[in-house]
Image: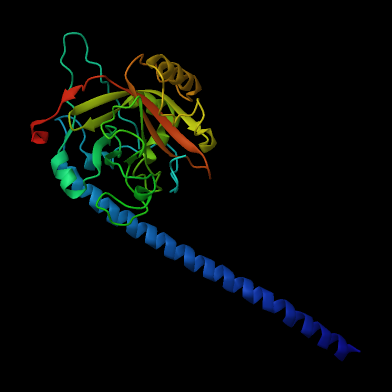
Amino acid sequence: MSRKDNSGGARRSGRSAVPRTVLAGVCLAAAAVSAVMLLENAREDRESGEVYASLEQFLTVPAGELSPSDERVSAAPPAISAEPQSDLSGAEPSAEPESGEPSDGEAAEPLPAADFEALRAINPDTVAWIRIEGTSLSRPVVQSEDNEYYLDHIFDGSHGSAGCPYLDCGNSPDFSDPCSIIYGHNRRNGAMFAPLLGYAEQSWVDAHPSVTLILPEGGYTVRIFAVLYADPDEAGSDTSPWRRSFESAEELDAWAAALAARSIADCGETPSDGRVLVLSTCDNSPDGRFVVLGRIPAEPDAPSAALNAS
């Protein structure tokens, strides 16, 4: 009887050992795949970082402002992790807030200028440069025939999951529409549009109340009036933060006011005129979006620099 029991026990043990072995193999394989993916992401981040760093030579920053290379190590979003996401469409803050409004009797501060001739020689899709002083967000903006290509291609056209900030394919490349939308990835390493997540904190809003939009004709100080989380399912609705068509200036203003009322941070008084700039990225949830909205002044705050003259 004891031999039979021992034999049966051995057979049962053998049968259960097989699934455990298979499970261990699956776990090891998954770990190996994960490690390969991490190494691949690290390689892509390094290579794309080198490409974008090489473009800094085409941006002229006024004396007294941080250069993009300085900004990469000076300020990151406060206590917010940034995960890489795919589909986008659908450190400490600086001590003194930047301001695009000169005080009475003072000339406007000079803004950075980009060499669009040189940038377009590398990539003819270049339409703008977007920048937030004191942060790592300082990148050229491109526009393709669709909203897919620059999700996984960097500025020089090579494949890379970091992508490149891009203007909605339905927008006018000169940003003359009532509302222009720029999409960008939220990268784990803090690159691309990851600093936008900092606007979830009031201190970040206070320290960075505007972004700089550089176009061939000059630079614009875009005053932020709303920061909010949004659902891609809102796209196509009248209240969507990605709405581009308006029948009148009054309708645009009413839409902007409604979004300002949704803001998760106090952005101060909402500008009452000007076109709207929307910066859109993924938040840290599976499907959510984080959106920053600002007003583009009717005229550039700083004219085009001589380096842009043909």
Question: Relative to 136, does residue 97 appear above or below in the rendering?
Answer: above
Instruction: Give the answer, above or below, for where 137 lies relative to 302.
Output: below
Residue placed at 50% from the left, 23% from the top?
Answer: 262
Q: What sort of colour scheme is used for the picture?
A: rainbow
Q: Is residue 152 visible?
A: yes
Residue 24: x and y in percent read: 60, 72
Residue 306: x and y in percent read 8, 31
Q: Position of residue 181 (x, y in %)?
A: 37, 33
| Quadrant placement of the N terminus | bottom right
Give me the residue at 47% from left, 24% from top: 263
Residue 265, horizontal then vertical, whole percent: 45, 24
Q: Quadrant of residue 199?
A: top left
The residue nearer to you, when weighing 58 against 194, is: 58
Circle count? 0
Decide: is 86 above or below 29: above
Q: Is residue 47 left or right of residue 235?
A: left
